[in-house]
Image (cartoon, rainbow, N blue to C red):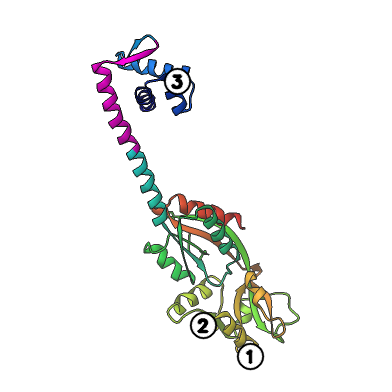
C-alpha cells in the first residue's frame, strides 16, 4: 500500500494520470491499475471521474493528506534506519590476533582482502605467544585469533582448522651434520633456547616438556634473531617450524626435523573465536583466512 499511496499522491498533485505516470516512471495504464487496486482495498472511490479529469471527495482529500504524512514518516524511517546501519558498520571494530612466531604472510593477506571487501569495518591487530592470545580471547579483549593448538579443543569456541607444519630444530652448523632428523631425547644434553618472555617461561617450558618431550635445560631469548645468534655461538638449540626456515642463516646454522621417538612432531594451527561472540564479520574473516591455506 505504501507504493500505491505514493502513486495516489502523484496523481492528485499532478492532477493528471499521464503526468503522474511520467513522474513515477511507469506507464499510465500501470498507475491507473494501482489506483484502482488501492480503491478496492479501501472500498472507497478516491477519484471522482468528471469527463477526462477527476475531482476529490471529502474522503479522498482526507486520504491524500494522511497519505502524505504516512509516506513521509516511512521515508524518514527508512533514511534513519540506513543511517544507523551505516553508522554501526563504521563503528564496528574487528579485533584480530596472530601467533608472532608463525609468520604473517597468510594472515596479512587475509586482513588485506577483508579490508577490501569491508572498507568501513575497523580492524585492530595484536600479536603474541599462544598464551597471550588465549588470555585476550578468554577475556573478550579480542574477537578471533590465529594460533597453534596447545590444549584439547573446547566446545566453547569455534575451532577452524587452517594448516599444520613440521617442527624443526635449529642447530650449530657443525653439530649433527650427518643426520637427516633428530629426536627430542637426542637433545637432552644441550640447552634449549626458548623465544619467549619471562612471564611466559613456565608455560612454554611445560609445553615443551609435556608435548614435545624436551628434556633439556632452558634459556630465554627475546627474539628469533637473538636465539639464532645464540645457536650460532654454540650456546644451544632452538625449535622452529618450517615457516621460520626462511629466516635461517644457513651459513652459520642448520635445521633438522624434530621427532618424538619414531614420529615426526607436527603443530596444528587454527582460527579460534568464542561461539557466543560469533558474528558475520568474524566468520567472514575466518573463511578468508582459511582460503589462504
What element does badge 3 sit on? helix
Q: In front of the other: label 1 or label 2? A: 2
Q: What's the distance in space between the residues labelled 2 and 3, CA to CA?
A: 80 Å
Q: Which mark is residue 18?
A: 3
Q: Which residue is mark 1?
A: 233
What stretch of residues is rendered in magenta? Answer: 52-75
Q: Which residue is mark 2?
A: 222
Residue at the extreme right: 178
Q: In front of the other: label 1 or label 3? A: 3
Q: Is residue 221 magenta?
A: no
**In this picture, is 241 found above or below 52?**
below
Task: Give the mark, 1 or 2, whose residue is nearer the N terminus.
Answer: 2
Q: Circle 3: is it few (<14), some (14-19), or many (20+) Cα within 10 Å?
A: some
Q: Residue at x 26, y 27 (%)?
A: 66
Q: Are marks 2 and 3 in contact (CB under 8 Å)?
A: no
What element does badge 1 sit on? loop
Amino acid at each position: 500500500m505504501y507504493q500505491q499511496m505514493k502513486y495516489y499522491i502523484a496523481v492528485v498533485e499532478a492532477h493528471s494520470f499521464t503526468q503522474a505516470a511520467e513522474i513515477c516512471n511507469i506507464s499510465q495504464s500501470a498507475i491507473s491499475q494501482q489506483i484502482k487496486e488501492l480503491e478496492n482495498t479501501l472500498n472507497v472511490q478516491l477519484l471522482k471521474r468528471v469527463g477526462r479529469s477527476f475531482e476529490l471527495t471529502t474522503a479522498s482529500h482526507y486520504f491524500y493528506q494522511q497519505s502524505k504524512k504516512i509516506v513521509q514518516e516511512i521515508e524518514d524511517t527508512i533514511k534513519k534506519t540506513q543511517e544507523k546501519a551505516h553508522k554501526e558498520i563504521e563503528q564496528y571494530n574487528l579485533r584480530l590476533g596472530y601467533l608472532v612466531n608463525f609468520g604473517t604472510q597468510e594472515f596479512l593477506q587475509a586482513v588485506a582482502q577483508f579490508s577490501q571487501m569491508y572498507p568501513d569495518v575497523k580492524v585492530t591487530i595484536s600479536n603474541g605467544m599462544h598464551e597471550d592470545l588465549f588470555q585476550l580471547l578468554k577475556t573478550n579483549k579480542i574477537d578471533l585469533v590465529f594460533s597453534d593448538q596447545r590444549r584439547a579443543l573446547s566446545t566453547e569456541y569455534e575451532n577452524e582448522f587452517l594448516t599444520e607444519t613440521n617442527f624443526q630444530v635449529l642447530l650449530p652448523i657443525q653439530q649433527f651434520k650427518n643426520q637427516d632428523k633428530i629426536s627430542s631425547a637426542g637433545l637432552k644434553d644441550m640447552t634449549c633456547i626458548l623465544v619467549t618472555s619471562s612471564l611466559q617461561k613456565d608455560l612454554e617450558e611445560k609445553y615443551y616438556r609435556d608435548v614435545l618431550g624436551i628434556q633439556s635445560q632452558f634459556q630465554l631469548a627475546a627474539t628469533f634473531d637473538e636465539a639464532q645468534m645464540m645457536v650460532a655461538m654454540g650456546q644451544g638449540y632452538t625449535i622452529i617450524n618450517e615457516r621460520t626456515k626462511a629466516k635461517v642463516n644457513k651459513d652459520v646454522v642448520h635445521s633438522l626435523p624434530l621427532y618424538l621417538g619414531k614420529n615426526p612432531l607436527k603443530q596444528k594451527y587454527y582460527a579460534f573465536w568464542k561461539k557466543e561472540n560469533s558474528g558475520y564479520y568474524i566468520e567472514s574473516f575466518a573463511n578468508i583466512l582459511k582460503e589462504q591455506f
